Amino acid sequence: MNRSDQKPLSGCRVLVVEDHRDTAESLRQFLTLCGFQVMVAYTCQEGLETARKLEPHIVLCDINLPDSDGYVVASVLRQSSGTTHARLIAVTGCAEAQHRRRALAAGFDQHLVKPIDLKQLFGELQAAN
């Protein structure tokens, strides 16, 4: 990734909703190194509460969460005034076409399959910024 091609990212808030702590921490480190302000939540409920406080520009959300699922997160965020325009990206192991369709119908803008291609993710984040 060529730093000279990047837009300023320091004011861009990203929320990662991911129950697998190693994955969440890896994403946090990558995004922080890219210049984003990053918060992490590990459950659906924690993600919704954090989003309400943070009003993120971008949300990276796993689909399979311990207390609900990412489809609920997306649909609630789309209806909340502080996050209605946020870029919502599903980051999931659910790779089938039906999961992609369901993610987009729930309000996600993009559906990325794990393991994540960091170049592709960075491109999505740049486009959202």
Image (cartoon, grey):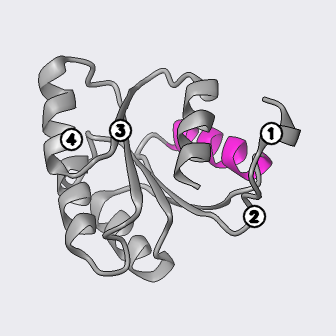
Span shown in magenta: 21-33
Q: Earlier in the sequence, mark 3 or mark 2?
A: 2
- Which residue is labeled 4 in the image? 104
**Callout 3 amino acid:** Gln
* Left or right of residue 107: residue 125: right
Describe the element under mark 3 as helix, strand or loop.
Answer: strand
The residue beneath circle 3 is 110
Instruction: Pinpoint residue 97: horizontal percent, then vertical percent.
Output: 17, 19
Which one is earlier in the sequence, the residue at label 1 or at label 4? 1
Q: Are the residues tagged 1 and 3 within 8 Å (C-beta)?
A: no
Toward which corner of the image does residue 72 lie, by quadrant? bottom left
Q: Amino acid at mark 4?
A: Leu
Label 2: state its secondary structure.
Answer: loop
- How far apart, in angstroms, are the residues tagged by discs 2 and 1? 15 Å
The answer to whether the residue labelled 2 contacts the one labelled 1, judged by CB atoms less than 8 Å apart, is no
Residue shown at 56% from the left, 27% from the top: 120
Left or right: where 30 falls relative to 47: right
* Residue type at tag 2: Ser
Q: Residue furthest right?
A: 4
- Circle 2 crowding by C-alpha within 10 Å: few under 14, some 14–19, many from 20: few
**CA–CA distance between discs 1 and 3?**
22 Å
Residues at marks 1 and 4, CA–CA distance in whole angstroms: 29 Å
Among numbered discs 3 and 4, the one appearing first in the sequence:
4
